[in-house]
Amino acid sequence: MAASLQRIGIVISRTFPVILQRNIQAQRIRHWKLTSSASPVLSLNFRALSSSSSSSSSDNSDSTETLSRYSDRPWEYLESEEYIERYGSKPVWSNYRRNHKGGVPPQKTRKTCIRGDKICGNPCPICRDPNIIVHYKNVNLLQQFVSPQTGIVYDPTRTGVCMKQQKLLNKAIETARDCGLLSAQLPHVDYSKEDYSNTHGAVAPTPAPFSLSSGELWYPWYGSIKPDERELARVRRIYKDYLKPDV
C-alpha cells in the first residue's frame, strides 16, 4: 500500500510541472495576442485559432491592417511616429537583454524565437515586433546591424538576434551591397604607376634567340664536362643492343 501511494505521488509530482508550464504558456500566448507584439506568423496562427470570438476578430483585423501596411514597404515603419516613440534614435537591439541561465551569456543565441504556436519568453528584437521586416531595401534597419567603422556585421551575441533572423540579415546585407544600397568596406592598397607601365624592364619584349653554327654548343661550359669512363662503359653494356655500331 505504501509503495503504491509513493508511486502515485511520483506521478503527480512529474505531471504537475508540465500542466503548470502549459498554463503559463497559454497565458503568454493570450498576452502576446492582445498586445499584438508577436511576429506575423504567430498573429496568423492566433487568427486561425480565435476566429470564433468577436473581440479577437477585431484585434486580428487591426493587426492585419498593420501588417499589410508595412509588408510591401517595410522601410516606412522606421520613419513612422510609432517607431520613433518606441525606439527613438537608438537601434532596435540597444535596450534588449536576453534571458539566460547564469551570469555568463551563452556563445550562441537561440535557433528561433517562434516554433509553431509557441513563442519564447523573451523573443529577439526582430521577432518581438511584427512591423520589423528584414528586406534588402530596408537600408535603415540593415545599417543598425553593421559596424560603421569596419563594415562587419555585428555578432548575434551582441544584438541578441536569433540565428534564424541572423541568417536573413546576412543574406539581406549581402544583397543590398550587391545592389549598391549599402557601402562595402574595401582595403586600401597603395601602388605606383611604374608597376603597371609597359616601359618597365620586366615587361620589355623578349630578345630574339641568337643563331648557332654547326657543332657549337648552346652552353659553352657543356663541352668541358668529361664523363666517367666506368659509368660510360656500364651504360654501353646495358644498351648495347640499341646502340649503333661504330663505323
Image (tube, grey):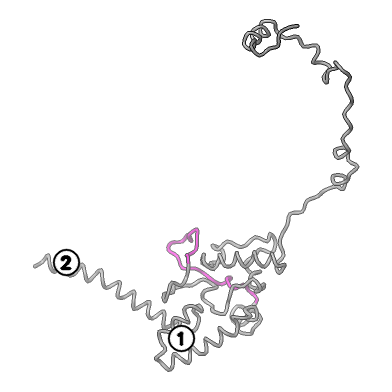
Give the camera-side residue of 90 and 246: 246
Q: Quick one: SS at disc 1?
A: helix
Mainly helix, strand or loop, the magenta region? Answer: loop
237 over 40 or under it: above or below? above
Q: Which residue is mark 1?
A: 34
Q: Quadrant of the N terminus?
A: bottom left
Give above or below for 44 relative to 105. Answer: below
Q: Which quadrant would residue 168 be assigned to in this image?
A: bottom right
Q: Which span is picked out in magenta?
A: 89-111
Q: Are marks 2 and 1 in contact (CB under 8 Å)?
A: no
Q: Is residue 178 magenta?
A: no
- Using the image, tell me which numbered label, if any, was put on residue 211: none
Q: Is residue 135 above or below residue 185?
A: below
Where 146 falls versus 47 (above or below)? above
Q: Which residue is mark 2?
A: 7
Callout 2: SS:
helix
Residue 146 in picture, x, y percent from top left: 65, 65
Type of amino acid at the residue the image marks with label 1: Leu
**Amino acid under disc 2:** Arg
**Residue extending farthest left:** 1
Residue 74 in the image: state x and y as whole percent: 62, 79
Which label's residue is closer to the chain start, 2 or 1?
A: 2
Could you tell whether 160 is left or right of 186 in the image?
left
State the image coordinates of residue 219 (x, y, percent, origin top left). 82, 19
Quarter of the image containing the C terminus?
A: top right
